[in-house]
Image: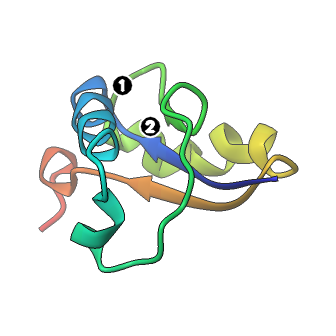
Amino acid sequence: MRECIFLLADLGMVAAFKGFFSRPGFHQALGIAPFKINLQSDIICDNAGNDPGVYVRAHELLRPYQTSHQNAVIVLDILHMGIT
């Protein structure tokens, strides 16, 4: 079973996360224990590419990963959603 799946709201976030997770020792910058991440399969993005879609449909988007991943992290840019 994979450790974690990351559901991101847009392709800009995908690029940023892949860049960050490509760095040696990325876990140290987060202050957490090391973990394995597959940049191709453990980072997913809503096809619509927007925060409101992820906010409303995260449970649907993550359902296929319930049996393959232990944890999920959902990342939204709330500024684009109009939430303050």
Residue 60, quarter of the rendered image: top right
Task: Give the residue drawn at x 46%, y 55%.
Answer: 74
Query: Which label number is shown at residue 81?
Result: none
Residue type at tag 2? Gly
Q: Residue furthest front?
A: 24
Task: Give the residue drawn at x 81%, y 51%.
Answer: 66
Rate crowding at label 2 as few (under 14), some (14 to 19) or many (20 or more) other CA atoms within 10 Å: some
Residue 35, quarter of the rendered image: bottom right
Please, is residue 56 above or below residue 9 in the view? below
Please, is residue 22 above or below residue 2 in the view? above
**Where does residue 27 sit, x and y in percent of width and height?**
35, 65
Q: Is residue 52 left or right of residue 79?
A: right
- Local secondary structure at mark 2: helix
Q: Is residue 58 left or right of residue 66?
A: left
**Where does residue 34 sit, x and y in percent of width and height?**
48, 67
Q: How is the image coloured?
A: rainbow
**Where does residue 25 sit, x and y in percent of width and height?**
31, 59
Q: Are marks 1 and 2 in contact (CB under 8 Å)?
A: yes
Query: Which label number is shown at residue 53?
Result: 2
Residue type at tag 1? Gly
**What is the C-alpha distance between the residues marked 1 and 2?**
8 Å
Q: Residue furthest right?
A: 67
Task: Give the residue drawn at x 57%, y 43%.
Answer: 57
**Where does residue 83 sit, x and y in percent of width and height?**
18, 61
Q: Is residue 55 left or right of residue 78?
A: right
Q: Which of 52/71 is in front?
A: 71
Residue receiving disc 1: 49
